Amino acid sequence: MKTVHGEENWLSWMDDISENDYVVVDQFLPQDLYEKVRSFFLSKLNSFTEAGIGANADNQINTKVRGDFTYWLDRKRDTELEPFWFLVDEIVHMFNRYCYLSLSGYEFHLAHYPSGGHYDKHLDQFEHRNNRMISVIMYLNENWLPGDGGELEIFEKDGSSFLVEPLAARCVMFKSATVPHAVLEAHKSRFSLTGWLLYQPSALGKFFG
Ligand code: OGA
Ligand code: MN
């Protein structure tokens, strides 16, 4: 398997996630892939829909809790993103290999938080659907400055928290069931590509978007 990132990098990231339940990796998206994903994102901006909370029947739109707009990706349809899908294969492979997970599916969406958007503290597993194992977020924001808001707040096991700026090409991965997190109010449009690695394929239910 030809990989984007070397074995040593993967080993140290998997060590981090095993120990802390999260890892933050800068320059995770190589420049050419970053540009491809970002231009795809911009080309779809008119097709985003307001995001809901909760799975399936529970799905409801509540902008008090979350204020982003999403566009669900489909590997068969979105073939322009092929190098990105290969990177997803690599991520799944590495988690299975080094964290002994039995991941067999994934779901990804583009997310746009317009200025003023945020997402309250939450976990990425739903009450009625707990097959999201690992959350993966890649940021697509150029020239993001302190004061632009939109930081990801990650809560540690001891209740303390720290902020991660949504910087271009940065990737955050964490265990979906155990890491509470929030998105602070963005003061300008905030772009990301967010997904979940699943214990079972996503045929489980109809998705919301
Ligand atoms: C989510 C989420 C965080 C981020 O979509 O569930 O928590 O930094 N996103 O975009
Ligand atoms: Mn989340």
Image (cartoon, rainbow, N blue to C red):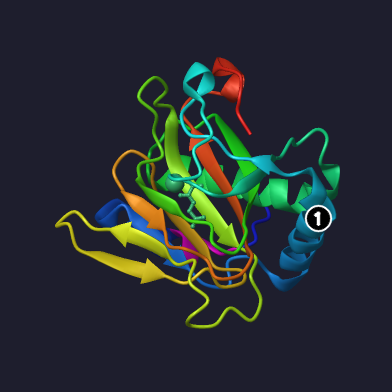
Residue at the image point whose x is 48% and y is 46% from the top: 66
Q: Measuring from the top left, give residue 2's x and y in whole percent.
A: 68, 55
Give left or right: position of 49 versus 125: right
Q: Quadrant of residue 32?
A: bottom right
In the rendered image, the vertical position of residue 132 relative to residue 82, given as above or below? above
Residue at the image point whose x is 55% and y is 68% from the top: 170
Please say whether residue 14 is visible from this viewpoint: no
Please say whether residue 23 is visible from this viewpoint: yes
In the rendered image, the vertical position of residue 101 relative to residue 137, given as above or below? above
Q: Quadrant of the C terminus?
A: top right
Give left or right: position of 39 versus 114: right
Q: Amino acid at mark 1?
A: Phe
In the rendered image, the vertical position of residue 59 relative to residue 107, given as above or below? above
Q: Measuring from the top left, give residue 151's x and y in whole percent.
A: 45, 67
Dot 1 falls on a residue whose secondary structure is: helix
Q: Circle 1 is placed at which residue position? A: 40
Q: Does the magenta stretch mainly form a helix, a strand or a loop? A: helix
Q: Quadrant of residue 205?
A: top right
Q: Measuring from the top left, give residue 23's x and y in whole percent.
A: 39, 61
- Which residue is outermost to the left? 158
Residue at the image point whose x is 58% and y is 59% from the top: 138
Of the pair 10 and 109, the residue shown nearer to us: 109
Q: Residues within 10 Å of mark 1 (few under 14, many from 20)?
A: some
Q: Quadrant of residue 78?
A: top right
Give left or right: position of 192 versus 97: right
| Label 1 near ligand 1 (CB < 8 Å) | no
Residue at the image point whose x is 23% and y is 58% from the top: 156
Give left or right: position of 27 versus 153: right
Q: Is residue 6 magenta?
A: yes
In the image, the segment drawn in magenta is: 5-10
